[in-house]
Amino acid sequence: MVSYDEICEILLKVDPSIRYVGILDEEKITFRKRADLDSLLNTSENMKSATHALLRWQSRRVFAKKFGMPLYAMAEYPLIKRVTMQLKGNVILLVSMDKDASHDKIIKKLLKIKEKMIIDI
């Protein structure tokens, strides 16, 4: 079984433009950030941001019977891009990357890795 810490470490290495990887499971967040960065959010803000992302993710499931389950959601901000994905149940993955990152390539890599790992978590 792969731990959340291990998943964060693996995903952080997917691309050099990934800044942060976090996994929210209920009220616990496990995360890693790129070593050369100062975090944009403090610990409390990080938890609040992840909780809001979970609520938004849950709201996307309202139309799952019509559209199918969402694969990911991406938001682009002036300073970063952030991707949200469901790992299982109410466990979500948050990945932020540099504003100039090739998010489409990174998302494809993340989805492939997620498919392989989901069985192990």
Image (cartoon, helix red, strand yellow):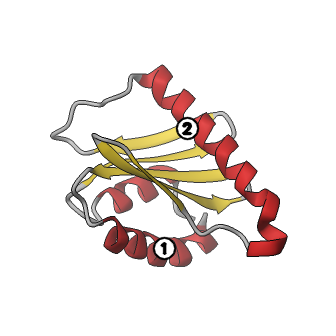
Q: Secondary structure at mark 1?
A: helix
Which residue is drawn at the image coordinates 60% and 52% (left, top)? Answer: 92
- Estimate the x, y position of residue 33 in percent, counting from the top left: 31, 42
Which residue is drawn at the image coordinates 62% and 35% (left, top)? Answer: 51
Q: Secondary structure at mark 2?
A: helix
Q: Which mark is residue 62?
A: none
Label 1 or label 2, whichever comes before in sequence order: 2
- Estimate the x, y position of residue 67 in percent, counting from the top left: 74, 74
Q: Which mark is residue 50?
A: 2
Using the rendered view, name the quadrant where residue 32 is placed. Answer: top left
Which of the image's four quarters has the C terminus? bottom right
Q: Is residue 54 visible?
A: yes
Indicate left or right for 60 with 18 as reference. Answer: right
Indicate left or right for 91 with 107 as reference. Answer: right
> 3 and 94: which one is in front?
94
Q: Amino acid at mark 1?
A: Leu
Q: Would you name the residue on which mark 1 appears? A: 111
